[in-house]
Amino acid sequence: MLVNATRMLKEAKAGHYAVGQFNINNLEWTKAILLEAQELNAPVILGVSMGAAKYMGGYKVVAAMVKALDEELGITVPVALHLDHGNYDAAKACIEAGFTSIMFDGSSLPLEENIEKTKELVKLAHDRGLSVEAEVGSIGGTEDGITGKGEVADPKECALMTSLGIDFLAAGIGNIHGIYPANWEGLQLSALADINAATGNIPLVLHGGTGIPDDQIVAAVKNGVSKINVNTDCQLVFAEATIAYCAAGKADPTAANTAKGYDPRKLLKPGFEAIRAKVKEKMTLFGEVGKAN
Ligand code: 13P
């Protein structure tokens, strides 16, 4: 059931658990995540970066694919289709294309401009029933060409951004997209507690969900995080499972007993199953299993 992310995240905040945002790259990714969420009776957010949308053929293609899969697979758990780290033009395009949620990432803009553009997009999105995420204090690392410095957000700026009517807020607390370096200092949990206190009841978003130790995830949820973004983890397990399948010679057309293992439906299956297993592991950690209603 395609919905915006407002209600599922308010319920997560009140219930002290988090909803996973899993980024999608293609049909296999989308189907794996939807089927696992349905199996676990958990709400889910499908994240789409600007780069991934371009790869899949554009925002309209993504929206049509997700809507059709949701219907044809009989998905009844709440599913939000969310633009991840969108610029102003991408946010507008997704509102038109039929997404149910957008993230406007104005964190690289001067604060005044970030505020003006966020206000305008909140109005446009809310008029059409979409939810809106904004960002303060950039997330470190690079994702699909978007690079952030990794600043810790200022609680006053977070409160200001929250007052613009956004539905959930991504606040940098030392989190990084991609694989964490060995010398990473961990999440700044006291900064998170300050941000949570300054922003009232708004659901907070933790980007860079891959590689954060489980105890820090649990502590972040206790301190107001209600949405956790995971991308690299699914990419890693998909690649690993596909490589193992090929290394075992299963895709080799000349080998005996291959039973046409190069057929894409067979070749991509181990990766598909690996994504399902990763989504299950993360949803269980986030405490959202059985929370769909
Ligand atoms: P990871 O790739 O580090 O899991 O981060 C995902 C993310 O934050 C998407 O916005």
Image: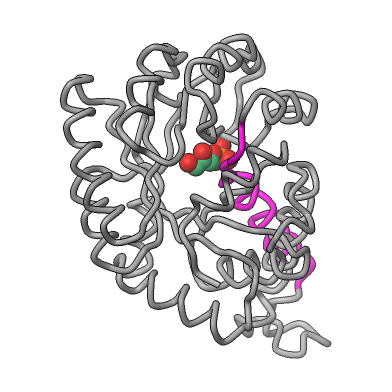
Q: Main secondary structure of the magenta part?
A: helix
The answer to whether residue 279 of the structure is visible from this angle is yes
Q: Residue at x 64, y 74 (%)?
A: 76
Dividing the picture into quadrants, the one containing residue 18 is top right
Query: Relative to the observer, which residue lies in front, 8 or 148?
Result: 8
Q: In this rendering, would 215 be left or right of 179?
A: right
Identify the colour scheme used.
one colour
Would you say 274 lies left or right of 58 here?
right
Q: Nearer the viewer, residue 78 or 135?
A: 78
Q: Is residue 207 visible?
A: no
Q: Residue most toward the right?
A: 257
Where residue 241 appears, as percent x and y from the top left, is 73, 60
| Rendered location of residue 211, percent (x, y) | 68, 32
Q: Is residue 117 left or right of residue 137?
A: left
Q: Position of residue 282 (x, y in %)?
A: 73, 47
Membership of 292 in magenta stretch: no
User: Residue 290 versus residue 263: which sits nearer the camera?
Assistant: 290
Residue 112, placed above or below residue 271: above
Residue 262 rendering spot, x and y as whole percentages: 64, 81
> Residue most toward the bottom?
259
The answer to whether residue 110 is above or below residue 232 is: above
Q: Which residues are magenta?
A: 225-249
